[in-house]
Image: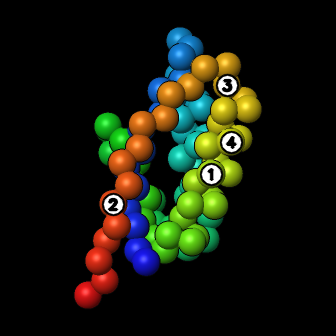
Amino acid sequence: MQIAIEISMYPFRPDYEPPILDFIDQLKEAEGLRVEVNDMSTQIFGAFDTVMPKLQSAIKEAFSEEQVTVMVMKVLHVPEG
């Protein structure tokens, strides 16, 4: 089952860019994911069973490093064919 996820990260701190870039870099290093970045969000594509554990790990790391961070996600099932 293929999925696409659009995610936006909002660290509540004045220098918000470094934690966002770290989060994106962690996702880009993960095998089995296609990661596309634009000015508004990051899109992640791949197999559900590959994407979700890697995304969970990246979110957990971001939350452990930041005091307050909001993640907004949309998850789409991409029919094969």
Single out the residue that lies furthest toward the left.
Answer: 81
As measured in the structure, the alpha-carbon distance from the residue carrying label 3 to the one carrying label 4 is 10 Å
Q: Earlier in the sequence, mark 2 or mark 4?
A: 4
Q: Which mark is residue 56?
A: 1
Task: Assess whether mark 4 and mark 1 are in contact (beta carbons under 8 angstroms).
Answer: yes
Q: Which residue is mark 4?
A: 60
Question: Real-space Cα distance between discs 1 and 2?
Answer: 16 Å
The residue that appears at 65% across and 36% down in the rendered structure is 62
Picture disc at residue 66: 3
* Secondary structure under the numbered disc 1 in the rendered image: helix
Q: Are marks 1 and 2 in contact (CB under 8 Å)?
A: no
Assess whether mark 4 and mark 2 are in contact (beta carbons under 8 angstroms): no
Image position, residue 2 (x, y; %): 41, 74
Residue that label 2 marks? 76
Residue 14 percent location from the top left of the image: 53, 12
Q: Amino acid at mark 3?
A: Glu
N-terminal label among 1 and 3: 1
Q: Nearer the viewer, mark 3 or mark 2?
A: 2
The residue under the point 29% across, 77% down is 79
Query: Between tags 3 and 4, which lies in front?
Result: 4
Q: Secondary structure at mark 3?
A: loop
Choose the circle earlier in sequence order: 1 or 2: 1
Left or right of 71: which side holds 27? Answer: right
Towards the viewer: 59 or 15: 59
* CA distance for labels 2 and 4: 21 Å
Please report contact status of discs 3 and 2: CB closer than 8 Å, yes or no. no
Residue type at the position of mark 2: Leu
Which of the two marks, 1 or 3, is nearer to us in this view? 1
Disc 1 and disc 3: Cα gap in Å? 15 Å
